[in-house]
Image (spheres, rainbow, N blue to C red):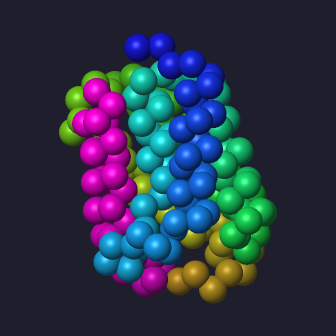
Amino acid sequence: MRIRLGHILLAYAAAFLLQTNWLSTFSVIGVSANYVLCALILLNSYSERPAVYAGAVLCGLLSDLCLGQYVGVAALAYLAVSAVLRVVSRALDQHNVLAVVYTALWATVLYETIYWLILILFGGQYRWAYLLARLPGLLFVNGVVTGILKGITR
């Protein structure tokens, strides 16, 4: 299925609005889904257009401007996830729901680790124990959201 640029923009706009407006409203186990990361994984499963990856980086910049402590941290983390995703996605069956959920799991770990490393380099107070405490909840929520959306959009 070929995905249009308008669909990519609409998906990222919805993900960005969910991320910035309803992030704290719909939390499970104290964490909320990373909707932009879920959109990146879903859009990549349908098309490997450069606009899919550029949209995630742009959303990262916008979310850093709105919510972040430093500008560019989330954008760099999304850029790293996009680079790995572009290489790895060819090896996985992107039409299988379980493969997409598996992709969401490792992408969540990669995103959070890179985000943590960049914050530590800038002198942030984001500690390793805090990341490890949040990670199981993030894995669960991102996996469920991505799996449900992939099942709906099949």
| 25 or 56: nearer the viewer | 25
Question: Percent x, y for residue 106?
Answer: 37, 50
The magenta span reads 128-154
Residue sitting at the far top: 2
User: Relative to 10, is 2 above or below?
Assistant: above
- The image position of residue 47, as x and y in percent, is 48, 22
Q: Return the residue nearer the eye: 58 or 87.
A: 58
Magenta stretch prevailing secondary structure? helix
Quadrant showing the C terminus:
top left
Q: Residue at x 50, y 40 (%)?
A: 40
Identify the residue at horizontal 48%, vertical 53% (top origin).
35
Q: Residue at x 51, y 68 (%)?
A: 23
Q: Is residue 69 left or right of residue 91?
A: right
Depicted 42 relative to depicted 57: above or below? above
Q: Is residue 53 something that shows in the picture?
A: no
The quadrant of the rendering that contains the N terminus is top left
Relative height, residue 3 to residue 111 (above, below) = above
| Total numbered circles | 0
Which residue lies at the image location 69% right of the left edge and 69% below the top edge? 67
- Asked if residue 6 can be seen in this view, the reply is yes
Q: Quadrant of residue 88?
A: top left
Is 134 situated left or right of 34 in this image?
left
Q: Report if residue 147 lies within the magenta region.
A: yes
Q: Is residue 60 above or below residue 11?
A: below
* Near-viewer residue (26 or 77): 26
